[in-house]
Amino acid sequence: MYSGGYTGKILRVDLTSRTFREEELPGDWAQDFLGGSGLTVKALYEEVPPDCDPLGPENKLIYAVGPFTGTTIPCASRMAVNAKSPATGAVGVAVSGGHFPVELKRAGYDMLIIEGRASEPIYLYVKDGQVKFRPADKIWGLCATDTQQVIKDELNDQNVRVSCIGPAGEKLSLMASIVNERRVAGRKGLGAVMGSKNLKAIAVRGDTSPRIANKEKYDAARKRMREGMQKSPVLYPQFSHYGTSSVVHLTEAMGIFPAKNWAGTGLFQAADKIGGFAIEHLSAGRTSCAICPVGCSQMRLAKELPYAGWLTEGPEYETLYSYGGVTCVDNPDAIIAADRLSDELGIDTISAGVTIAFAMELFERGILTASETEGLDLRFGNDQAMVKLLHLMGERKGLGDLLADGVKAAAQRIGRGSERYAMHIKGLELPGYDVRGAKAHGLSFATAFTGADHNKGYAFQEIFGIPVPYAVDRFAIEGKGKLCKWNQDARTAVADSPTMCVFLMDMAVADFMFENTAALMEGTTGLSYTPEEVHQVGERVNNLARVYNILAGFTRADDDLPERLKTEPIPEGASKGQLISQADLDFMLDEYYDARGWTREGVPTREKLEELRLGYAADRLGL
Amino acid sequence: MAKVTVRTIGPLRQVLGGPQVEMTVADGDTVHALLRRLGEEKGGEFARFVSWLEGLGRAGAATSAEAGAPAGAAAPAEAGTPAGPGVPAYSPLRVLLNGRDVFPEKCAEVVLTEGDELLVFSPVAGG
């Protein structure tokens, strides 16, 4: 049983009855699932029917912080938010940093589970073991920043921390996000789940600190991690100054920066205009999540009309891809404005940008006509049309209403062969890596339990050239099934579940990541793990999430890539000629399922589930 | 003789003298040989990287010898082979030849040929 780190409490709120109660965090949940993503997957599996309507009252919104959140361990101020995703119908976990996670922990909770549906718009105020259900009539319709400010003013507390939705979430856009000040749980449409519950925001305030189980071991583990951070040639020398934005230069040089709705990779060269090294003149300082000495968040200010005056925390790499690469927009001011507008509307930048690129391709191909776009000239590169369409999507107006649920839904509505240009997996739009030139990363896109998610099994070996656990050839397909499993389990175990920043895993502790987590867990919580057992936590979470998705109707056929990636080679650049054919994908999938101990249909076996202490999931599958 | 292109990104362009330079190498020249020339001609990070590489080579040889392996056999970095002693997780510079990584312990083995494109840059991550 844990003796530190965790508060030991789950706060359960029923919006229908406007009641709440505190429950004990079971010891085996902590031991087996650590926190964050792991705990939310466990709760989703136990409590949310896999066949439920994601926007109905049976779905639940589940927040979980980690055992290190709120301690002095750097870069652990994160949380996971989960629900059955309305975008995919699968597990919908998203991870966010900022300051809200620490405040939730300080308020006394490891998890917050929100059930039911309020009869009218409300927001929650959590403080001193109490939950107040407050009317949201003053803030319904407001953008994210104003929502947070009005709540702070109303509560007469400028230090309260707020997690909220914008207009997109209220209007049930399937790409709506949850905004925590300026950080975002962006993907999988979790903002729509919140909106479906008539829940505009959650305000939290607390003043307790977690207990440390073994101070000596805690200090030693923390010291070793900080030494890894100091030694890194990337973390402070580069990442503190540019954040993720410099990766545009890398992926463009490697020929994997997607462009023109994934038809123009290598042809559209924009790094020297929009990449992190090119937009230093737009810097307006930097900021950080709570208890983070790195401070990767870059503040940038647009300076040229019509965007002058827009300030944003970003744009991050993925946003430079979505509002830059795939839309062929090379005006950094426009991207800054679109980034900020997205955070105000509460809409995911990746899904929104990819959806706009989809509309641009349909427009250029004549599938969407000028009358259907209501006069918007949606040619690639038209930054003003992009920003206008984004606004329409966030408010679900006109053409924006057609596109507000992402490319899969839009293609179904439009028809006329448009599905071929809809770049998604399981209903989630593709992130910014042309995986035809990074095969393990592509396999992870195809198999991630959340759909096309770069963060579930990031192949840092291929993208960043880090030879852990071994060096790889990014163009090869052999061995990638095994590597993909390793990455997915590692990412879940070392970053998303203990809620440690993924960038630390990539840049500072790659060669001792499991030992690092084990040592921090022992010092903080008193729970003991071998490095192998830490890695196995990730395997457990990935297996339980897979079972949930199978129960929701997913099969091997859903572990797929868009047709374009399987049939059209990358046209130009350092990855020219690369693609992942159906035969390549099948080869990698077989290898992946074998590595996971699943059947060739992608179903976990009873033997594997029992090995992971998930025998109950085998029973539920009828194995 | 072979003509090769050396490219870089980010602040290292100032050291290289631009986003790319064309260089002529002798038959049989390796990536390491070209990097050494860059170190001599351009200095800065290139020179420091070559010193680091050569220090790594000595350390790798010593480690291998201690482990009973043939002297000079750096720890393996083939696909699927676990990284061992002497294979650092983080390198001061990253080197790609025609889009593929050349890991530090392989720089002295990989021979350049006509038309090769070498990308050398300070490591970038995040995203």
Image (tube, coloured by chain):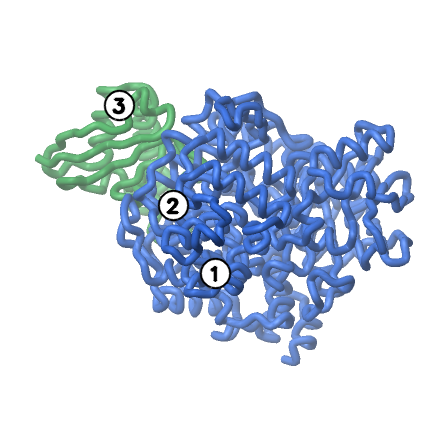
Chain colours: A blue, B green
Q: Percent from the top left, x then y, of residue A503?
A: 54, 39
Left or right relative to A194: residue A248: left
Left or right relative to A494: residue A461: left
Q: Residue at x 59, y 66 (%)?
A: A546
Task: Report the label total.
Answer: 3
| Residue type pointed to by label 1 | Ala
Label located before the other in sequence (2 or 1): 2
Q: Chain of mark 1?
A: A
Q: Chain of mark 3?
A: B
Front residue of A167 and A264:
A167
Q: Is residue B51 above or below residue A610?
A: above
Residue A372's mark?
Answer: none
- Look at mark 3 in the image and give the residue it sits on: B39
Mark 2 residue element: loop
- Look at mark 1 in the image and give the residue it sits on: A446
- Look at mark 2 in the image and give the residue it sits on: A259
Mark 1 residue element: helix
Q: Percent from the top left, x then y, of residue A471?
A: 38, 48
Q: Percent from the top left, x then y, of residue A22?
A: 88, 52
